Amino acid sequence: MSDPAIELRGISKSFGPVHANKDIDLRVMPGTIHGIIGENGAGKSTLMSILYGFYKADRGEIHVRGNKVDIPDSQAAIRAGIGMVFQHFKLVQNFTVLENIVLGAEEGALLKTSLGRARKLLKQLSDEYELHVDPDARIENLGVGMQQRVEILKALYRQADILILDEPTGVLTPSEADHLFRILEGLKREGKTIILITHKLREIMEVTDTVSVMRRGEMTATVKTAETDPEELAELMVGRKVLLQVDKAPAKTGETVLEVRNLQVVDESGVERVRKISLEVKRGEILGIAGVAGNGQSELLEVLGGMREGTGEVLLNGAPLPLAGAGSDARTRRRVGVGHVPEDRQTEGLIMNFYAWENVGFGYHDDPRYNRGPLMNNHALREDAEAKIAKFDVRPANCWHTARNFSGGNQQKIVIARELEREPDLLLVGQPTRGVDIGAIEFIHEQIVALRDQGKAILLVSVELDEIMSLSDRIAVMFDGRIMGERLPADTNERELGLLMAGITDTEHEHSHDEIEQNLAQSSGKAG
């Protein structure tokens, strides 16, 4: 039996009083795809950062191919044959693919020599692993799927035999994700070892050979993927049974709450982000907007939420909403019954250095309950915040914690609690469970469905296709600022939605991956 490609023995790491990793043992066999899953804060990223040399373990040993090694920095990891593809790519946007590949691995004083050697080796790697990409293309003109290929090629160029991929499909369409999995299978056939960090249980089941589960800094289980199922893995992650599918009754729709007609948004640079789209949302339904990030969904939410100006016509309960000038701001939107959970909770939904009780009141300071004459009634605001924190299970349940001191999932719960408890006629929700634990995802989904069942209208934007399929009563797909089509969840599938997300409407025709990626790259270039 061969030595493990990677063996971690008794790895521990603390940050002050927080034990991020506690005596972790892990064996990853060569030529396999090994998944690592766990909730936010479970210690996955810390463990991989230790393996890649970003952190130094307080104690424990790292063995690579049977040899004990010291990895004080990423250069030592690269010398040990370990490469890492980060969730947020580490590429220079105005450099070419070739320049990014060579960056940090130049040979000698003459860059021309390094580029020539790299061009030849890049072609060999591209052909061998189906990672075809134009070496002279600028990164800023490539879609995210192509940029991810560049990151993988960077690691292979540096002769990595062990690849760590951190949430690699977070920004990919289903077609791009499928192609990535084929690439990973090809790498495995060539003897490469892959460690895959993902929160998507379907991907774990589809592509890995073995999966390790982390919870609260400890390794709770390692199992053969063929011998487990998503339900068991979810329970191992959370410590209790988790409902993986949204449990909801058929929608009982009423009159139209939101009507959008020929909405257009042009950004500060003169780029048309939303191209005269029309849609409507009825009382008692969830309209999901699917699409790859950067195709106009964010601008749509911002206009409807009063954060950006646009042209066209928007009606709320039959009354027009101003799209520019007086009355088009977020405060006015809230007053007329529009709630908004923004896509970026930290920059748009919270003030990170303010207390939780202050954040719960933001946007609603003119509520009579929070006022005592000309002064704020902070006691009433704190009482209201404490009730919301308890109902939405925000941890720790301390309204005197600043927003910065909560985990991402609990920050999201604060924003969700603030907006949903207002019971708005129209709720705008952007990426409701981005970076949220699987247990918290279940809770947030339940709250959104409960609001729908109260007869409210909900416009949901998410890059998570599973979430769109599970929560939505109707699905509209955006590509390059346009609505490409509308589907009922029961009458479609991820492949059809993936093609629409890539700008392809003829689902009867079998399209190539190159055609899909060309469309996505074109859209990404316009969005950028």
Image (cartoon, rainbow, N blue to C red):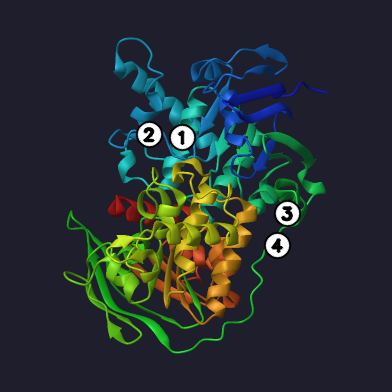
Q: Residues within 10 Å of mark 2 (few under 14, many from 20)?
A: many
- Mark 1 or mark 3, earlier in chain: 1
Q: Nearer the viewer, residue 287 or 352?
A: 352
Name the kind of residue labelled 2 in the image: Leu
- Mark 4 or mark 2, earlier in chain: 2
Image quadrant in which you'd find residue 419:
bottom left
- Mark 2 highlights which residue? 91
What distance separates the C-alpha of mark 4 from that of mark 2? 38 Å
Residue 456's disc number: none
Secondary element at tag 1 = helix
Determine whether 454 is above or below 390 in the image: below
In this picture, residue 48 sits left or right of residue 263: right
- Mark 1 highlights which residue? 151
Q: Residue at x 68, y 61 (%)?
A: 244
What distance separates the C-alpha of mark 1 from that of mark 2? 8 Å
Q: Residues within 10 Å of mark 3 (few under 14, many from 20)?
A: some
Q: Residue at x 58, y 20 (%)?
A: 81
- Mark 1 or mark 2, earlier in chain: 2
In this picture, residue 516 sits left or right of residue 250: left
The quadrant of the picture occupied by the N terminus is top right
Residue 230's disc number: 3
- Mark 4 or mark 1, earlier in chain: 1
- Mark 3 or mark 2, earlier in chain: 2
Q: Is residue 502 visible?
A: yes
Q: Residue furthest top?
A: 108
Residue 243's disc number: 4
